[in-house]
């Protein structure tokens, strides 16, 4: 098929929109991709090959779905907007390796979907141009479920991508960084200009690749507690670690002096700010307080 006929071109996208009288719903984060080169780059970075299984979130009118169907073995795509289902049936009719599911991804049982659609030995990846209004809830749901997948490669708001892939001691580093990097190796693989979207979004975009870790990079005694301590450390970014912990433990069995003792015992200076702590230091901190409270 010549590239002129691909869905991801301004001409073909306009034709499809006109044919179906489709109007964009801003509330669903509908910004469609109209550049095949960008899509090929995303797919290359995702490490997709002809054996891969792919889950896509939000196929829109099928721009990315079509390229995935060409490069992968099979594709399952979740779309929330009922109006797009008949359109997709038509735009993707030439491809027999795509399954469309009309469902909110936040409600979906993705694990069962993977068992049902992909072979256990098949490498499975998530690839998406995500709706920006719910990027973080979607990614955190998929990561917490510990799905049997190799990677997630997603187009998201540039600022959020930078937060997820951040290093300590930077403005972008925060509880979201730790939450994402606990499960994955995070890397911003490219920045994407606004002109490749229709309509153009108000924010800048990047492609983030999250490669699933075989096991977490640190040993924590209790994951929920670990994430709660990380949240607490960043609750007020300008405050010291000690002061954020004092606020967090107010009214609990852990008193101010006890906080100082624990910090001294593990060798972490309480006058530091949360943003200077590495993942290892957060694990040390959380484990020490967990032991002290249980
Ligand atoms: N993949 C298409 C592309 O790149 O041209 C469209 C991407 S557009 C940024 C996001 C898509 O996600 C839209 O089709 C929108 O309807 C869909 N969407 C929004 N919220 C969703 C949700 N909770 N579950 C599934 N799909 C959703």
Image: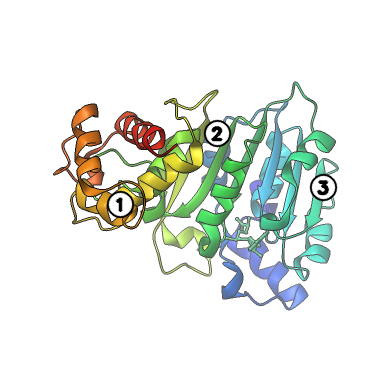
Residue sitting nearer the eye, 50 or 80: 80
Measuring from the top left, give residue 83's x and y in whole percent.
Answer: 77, 71
Q: Is residue 249 left or right of residue 116?
A: left
Residue 169 can be seen in this image: no
Residue sitting nearer the eye, 116 or 32: 116
* Residue 99 numbered mark, or none: 3
Measuring from the top left, give residue 158's x and y in whole percent.
Answer: 39, 54
The answer for how far apart the CA atoms under marks 2 and 1 are is 35 Å
* Residue 144 numbered mark, or none: none
> Dot 3, how many residues are within 10 Å of its Cα: few (below 14), some (14-19), or many (20+)?
some
Residue 256 to residue 211: above or below: below
Q: What's the residue at 42%, 39% (across, down)?
A: 226
Identify the residue position indicated by label 1 in the image.
234
> Dot 2, how many residues are within 10 Å of its Cα: few (below 14), some (14-19), or many (20+)?
few
Q: Are the residues tagged 2 and 1 within 8 Å (C-beta)?
A: no
Q: What's the residue at 17%, 41% (across, down)?
A: 270
Residue sitting nearer the eye, 177 or 208: 177
**Foreground label between 3 and 1:** 1
Residue 148 to residue 174: above or below: above
* Secondary structure state at the residue bearing disc 2: helix
Of the image marks 2 and 1, the number of the one nearer the N terminus:
2
Answer with the quarter of the image where residue 80 lies. Answer: bottom right
């Amino acid at each position: 098929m010549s590239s002129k006929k691909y869905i991801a071109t301004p001409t073909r996208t306009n034709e499809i929109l006109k044919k179906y009288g489709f109007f964009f719903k801003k509330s669903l984060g509908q910004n469609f991709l109209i550049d095949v080169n960008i899509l090929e780059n995303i797919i290359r970075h995702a490490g997709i090959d002809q054996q891969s299984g792919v889950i896509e979130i939000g196929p829109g009118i099928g721009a990315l779905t079509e390229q995935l169907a060409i490069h992968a073995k099979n594709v399952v795509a979740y779309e929330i907007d009922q109006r797009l289902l008949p359109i997709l049936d038509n735009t993707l009719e030439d491809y027999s390796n795509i399954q469309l599911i009309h469902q909110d991804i936040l409600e979906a049982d993705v694990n069962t979907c993977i068992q049902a659609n992909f072979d256990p030995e098949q490498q499975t990846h998530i690839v998406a141009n995500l709706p920006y209004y719910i990027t973080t809830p979607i990614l955190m749901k998929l990561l917490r479920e510990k799905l049997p997948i190799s990677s997630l490669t997603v187009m998201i708001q540039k600022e959020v991508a930078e937060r997820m892939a951040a290093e300590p001691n930077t403005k972008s580093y925060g509880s979201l960084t730790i939450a994402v990097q606990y499960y994955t190796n995070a890397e911003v693989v490219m920045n994407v200009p606004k002109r490749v979207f229709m309509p153009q979004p108000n924010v800048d975009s990047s492609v983030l690749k999250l490669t699933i870790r075989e096991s977490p990079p640190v040993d924590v005694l209790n994951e929920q507690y670990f994430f709660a301590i990380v949240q607490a450390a960043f609750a007020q970014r300008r405050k010291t670690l000690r002061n954020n912990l004092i606020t967090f433990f107010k009214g609990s069995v852990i008193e101010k002096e006890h906080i100082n003792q624990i910090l001294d015992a593990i060798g972490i200076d309480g006058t530091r700010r949360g943003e200077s702590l590495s993942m290892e230091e957060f694990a040390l901190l959380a484990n020490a307080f967990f032991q002290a409270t249980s």
